[in-house]
Amino acid sequence: MLESSERSPSIDGGPTKTVLISDPSLRDGNHAVKHSLTAEQIAEYCRASDAAGVPIIEVGHGNGIGASSLQLGLSACPDEVALRVARENLKRSRLGIHIIPGFATIERDLSRAIDLGVDVVRVASHCTEADLTERHIGYARQKGRSVFGVLMMSHMASVEVLVEEARKMESYGAEGFVFMDSSGHYLPGDVARRVTALRAGLSIPVGFHAHNNLGMAIANSIAAADAGATMLDGTVRGFGAGAGNAQLEVLVAVLHRLGYATGIDLYKLLDAADMAEKKIIEAVPTISSVSIVSGLSGVFSGFLKPVMRVAAEYRVDPRDVFFELGRRKVVAGQEDLIIEVASELAKTRSAA
Amino acid sequence: MGQLKVAVIGSGNIGTDLLIKVLRSPYLKCGAFIGRNLSSPGMSKAVKLGVLVSDESIGFIEKNPDCCDLVFDATSALDHRRHAPILDQLGKIVIDLTPAQVGVMCSPAVNIDEALKSRNINMITCGGQASIPLAYALSLSHKEIDYIEVVSSIASRSAGPATRRNLDEYIHTTQDALKHFSGAGSTKAILNLNPAQPCVNMQTTLLAQVSNPDMEAYRLHLSAVVKNVRRYVPGYEVIVGPTVENGRVVVMVRVRGLGDYLPAYAGNLDIINCAAVAVAEAHARKLGAVPVH
C-alpha cells in the first residue's frame, strides 16, 4: 500500500492539481556566470529542456532583456541572438522573458523581443513600484502574449502592500502574478501566508520564485503550491544568483510525489540538468556564509563587498553590520548607509 | 516691461516645485498655475501662495492668452505633444519639462545660447540634466567616445504618476540627448526608483568606454562645467571620480535639492527645475525684463 505522500493522481482518484513550471536557468543563471552564457549553451539547454517538456523557458540577461550594461554586466550574447537561438530550439516549450521597466523600454527592447517570437512576458518591478509596469504589461497584452506581473524583493513589503501592488498589476492586464523571494529570506509559513492573501485579493493565478539562502527554496515552493499557488519557478541545479533558486529537478520530483502534475518528463529533465552541470554551470550554487547572513537579514547580497571593506575599516563584525542594515530595510543604492551603521556599531562597542 | 509673465501647466511634483522657484525669481512672475484638479496637493499649495489657479488645463491659456508670455509645461510627454502646436499658435515661448522631445534640447551649462534662439526648449530629463554636463566635458577631452552609460537613482517618493508613466520616454530622451551632446557611438540610460526610507538623494553615475582615457584633461573640463552647473543648481556635487576603474571612466554626482516642495533628497526636481528657471530668466533678460528684488 502506498503512503499518502507517494500516491499518484490516478490512484488518488481526485482531480489532479497542476503546477505551471517556469524555468529561468538561462536568465537567473546568467547572474551566476556574469552574464556570459553563449548562443551555443542557450541552444543546447533549450533543446534539452524542450525535450523534457518544461512549459516555459526564460532567456536573457540576469536582470532581463535590455539590462546588459556596464553597471550590471554586459551580456556575452546579445538579447536578439539569445532569443532567436532559443526560439529556433524550442518546439513545445514556450519562450519567456523577464523585463524590468527602467532598464528596458517597449520601443527599444520589448517590441523587438515580441517580433522574435517571445510567448510569455514577465514584467517585473521592485515590490512597491508596480505602477512602473502598467504600459509594458498593456503593450504585451495588446500584442497577444501571455503576460505575468512580477514583484521582486517581496519580503520588503508587508503582506497588505504586496497584495495591493499585485492588484495593480492585475488591473493593468496581467494574467498571472509571481512574487520573488530575491533575498531567500522566507520560511514556509511566510510564503503560505502571502499566497493565501494574494489568492484572496486577486482573481488571476499566483506564482512563486524562490532563492535558497536559508536552504528553504524547495520547502517554500511546496508551501506555495499547498497554499494554492499554481505557478512555480525553478532552475536546474539551482543555477541562479547568489545561493541559487529552487533546484528544478528536485522541485519537479517532489511535486510529482505529492501528486501535482507538471507535464514534465523527470528522466529527461535529469538529463538536461546533468548536461547543464557539465557544459553550462561553472560552479553549482552553494549556500555560502554570506548567503546565510544575507538571507537571514533580508539584505541584498550585492552589499557584501562594501560591507566587508567598511567593517574592516571600523573594526566591527560584518555580520552585525548586515543585521543592522536589514533592520533598517536597506535597499540597493543605499550603500552610503553602511558607513553610518558601521561607525555607530564601533561607537557602541567602545562605550560598552 | 517689468518681470516676464509666466504660467505653469501641470500641478504635480515638478510643476509645484517649479512654481516656488518662479515666485522666488526676480525676473519672473507667475500669471497662472494650471492643472486639472483643484483639490490636488499642488493646487492647494498654489492657492496658499496666493497664485491664480485654474483646473482647465491648456484651455485656460487658450481662453486667457494674456495670462503669460512664457509657459512651463510640466505635464507629460503625451500632453506636451498636444500642447506644443496650440502654444506655438498663441505665440508663447515654451519651456518643456517633459521628455516629449518637441523643442531644442537644452542643458544650460552646455548650450543655453543656442537654446535661446528657439521658442520651444526641451529640458530633456532630470537624469539628462545631471549627466549631460559630465558627458559633454568628456567629449571636450576625448575625440572619440565609444559608449556612454548613465545610471540615475531617485527617491521613489519624488516620482509622481506622470514621471512613472513616462519611464520609457525618460530613457529614450536621455539617451538621445547624451548622444547629441557627446557624440558618443552609442548611449544607454537606466533609471532606478529607490523606495528606501529615509529617502535617498538623487545620484547619477556616468560610465564610459573611451580608448586611451586622459583623466588629466577630463578633470580640467569637468571642473569648469560643474562650476557652471552649480551656478543654477547649488546642490550639484561630484562625489566619486573621475577615475578609470576596470577599463571604464567613472564619475558620480549627487544632487541635493533646495527643499522647496519636496525635501532636499529630491534633487531630481531641482536639477530640471533650476535649469528651466535659468533658461526662463535668460529669456527674460533678452526681452528686457526688469528684475524686482
Image (cartoon, coloured by chain):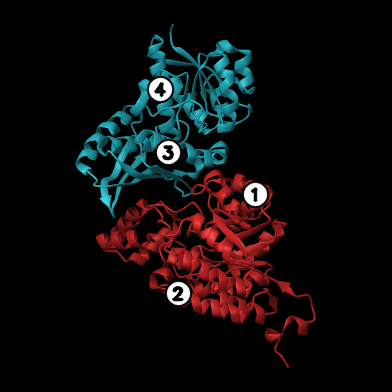
Residue B288 horizontal/vertical position (percent)? 39, 9
Instruction: Indicate which disc residue A279 carries.
Output: 2
- State left or right for residue B210 relative to residue B256: left
Q: Earlier in the sequence, mark 3 or mark 4?
A: 4
Callout in the foreground (2, 3): 2
> Separation of disc 2 and disc 3 at Cα?
41 Å
- State left or right for residue A231 relative to residue A330: right
Q: Are marks 2 and 3 on the same chain?
A: no
Chain to which the residue tagged by mark 3 belongs: B
List the residue tagged with mark 3: B127
Q: Amino acid at mark 3?
A: Gly
Q: Amino acid at mark 2?
A: Lys
List the residue tagged with mark 1: A168
At mark 3, the secondary structure is helix
Chain to which the residue tagged by mark 2 belongs: A
Res. A14 visible in picture: yes
Chain to which the residue tagged by mark 4 belongs: B
Q: What tint does the image give chain B?
A: cyan
Instruction: Indicate which disc residue A115 carries.
Output: none
The answer to whether the residue labelled 1 contacts the one labelled 3, judged by CB atoms less than 8 Å apart, is no
At mark 2, the secondary structure is helix
The answer to whether the residue labelled 1 contacts the one labelled 2, judged by CB atoms less than 8 Å apart, is no
At mark 4, the secondary structure is helix
At mark 1, the secondary structure is helix
> Separation of disc 2 and disc 4 at Cα?
56 Å
Pick whichever, B97 or A142, lies toward us.
A142
Callout in the foreground (4, 1): 4
